[in-house]
Amino acid sequence: MFEVIKQWLSDQGVAENLLSITSMLISSGIILLISGISYYLVKRKALVTIKKVILNSKNQWDDLLLKHEVFSRITLLIPFLFLLFLTPLLLPSKHIFTSFLLIFAKVAISFHVAHCISAMLNVSKSVYKEQAKERYLPLNSTIGIVKLAIYLVAIILSISFILEKSPVYLLSGLGALTAVLLLIFQDTIKGLVASIQISANRLVAPGDWIELPQYGADGDVIEIGLNMVKIRNFDRTVTTVPTYALISGSFKNWRDMYNSGGRRIKRSIIIDIGCIGFYDQDKIKQLNEIKLLQKYLSDKQQEISLSCQNLDGTTPDNINTHQLTNIGTFRAYIEAYLKQHKNVHHKMTCMVRQLSATATGLPLELYFFSNDQDWVNYEAIQADIFDHLFAMASYFDIRIFQHPSGHDWKN
């Protein structure tokens, strides 16, 4: 074809010394023109039609093809394919400019094919995120490794095109570089291994609430990548943690708490030991007005009567017989109050226990679960319960311990 153009120019009276360069320019112009027209037609006509068809379809996965620009990347291949096939037809085969255009076209096609495959992998990742809600698979890490391998292949092919050597020839020399490659990609390899272990053991998944105090992370996992895990903290900041850190160290995962249906509340009320004492009969009658305590008081009075009978009818007193204490009654009231509370999970552990006395008093620990796991509602439930208990403490002749304040010194 080049000779035809050259002969045509000769017939048109082009000077002999300008014939070759003119033929090259015209041939190159034809190649660029055809490549440009093909790109325009595909970009402005075919791609617009494809977009209309996809937007009118009911499928969701084809919308992801548009979102990740798969078709836009494929259109970029068209002009380079025309460049590759037209160059040897319109230009002399042994000319340096022909070799340059062919090498340029092959290198561009290699990287654009890798670019298209990368976009398809992004589509696969998006489909996975929409369908897989609970179980985490190391797809991000796997896709990262696949992308890395694809671009490495593209680089090797490009070098082989430039040097005009077989890719096998270049790959044979990579054996000596294995140690160097392992050193360069050690974080990537460790991240991939960590991702596989995380998936196999179901340690963490996107959406889980985890805590890593050593990294200052406390929030929801938003992405598990090849090298990094992104965690959105509750103050809306984002902390990045090495993926390998999830298996090399320890962290707390709150997933099972959400799956259980309850959220633990564990808090203590510190009782002033100096206020602990026995109840007399008048106080017991007064407490009988509390419906939550009626069964407890009835059982305890029977127990006290039985204790007196065992002592040969001795009159009940605080020394020889078992008596009701204010702290024991208060503890029974708290248990009864929690067990009838609508926001307490009644199928999970619910108890009130005494801890060892300290220099600040006697801790009365409440251990139970709320049936609402939402953070705001959880805090409101917890506050309402303790508001009520603090207010009721004085009714049981109980004093809550606190260090002396300015008001105390004033009194």
Image (cartoon, grey):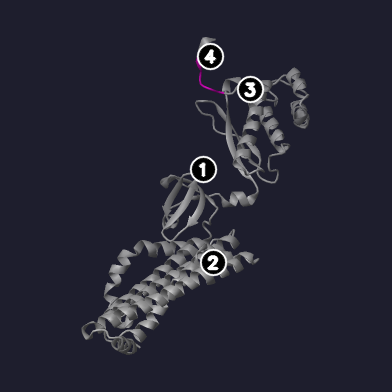
Q: Which residues are magenta?
A: 401-408
The residue to which callout 2 is attached is 65
Q: Could you give the CA–CA distance between mark 3 and mark 1, rounded to whole angstroms?
A: 38 Å
Q: Could you give the CA–CA distance between mark 1 and mark 2, rounded to whole angstroms?
A: 33 Å
- Disc 4 vs disc 1: which is toward the camera? 1
The residue to which callout 3 is attached is 398
- Which residue is situated farthest in the top direction here? 411
The x and y percentages for residue 410 are 52, 10
The residue to which callout 4 is attached is 408
Disc on res. 234: 1
The x and y percentages for residue 305 are 77, 27
- Quarter placement of the C terminus: top right
Q: Secondary structure at mark 3?
A: loop
Density class for disc 2 (Cα within 10 Å; few <14, some 14-19, many ≥20) is some
Q: Could you give the CA–CA distance between mark 4 and mark 1, rounded to whole angstroms?
A: 38 Å
Asked if disc 3 and disc 1 are in contact, CB closer than 8 Å, the reply is: no
Which residue type carries mark 2? Leu
Query: Residue visible at 33% across and 88% down?
Result: 8
Q: Please tell me which of labels 4 and 3 falls first in the chain.
A: 3
The x and y percentages for residue 191 are 41, 61
Query: Residue visible at 73% across and 19% down?
Result: 283
Q: Please tell me which of labels 1 and 2 falls first in the chain.
A: 2
- Disc 3 vs disc 1: which is toward the camera? 1
Q: Secondary structure at mark 4?
A: helix
Q: Could you give the CA–CA distance between mark 3 and mark 2, rounded to whole angstroms?
A: 68 Å
Residue 248 relative to residue 64: left or right: left
Asked if disc 4 and disc 3 are in contact, CB closer than 8 Å, the reply is: no
Q: Is residue 233 magenta?
A: no
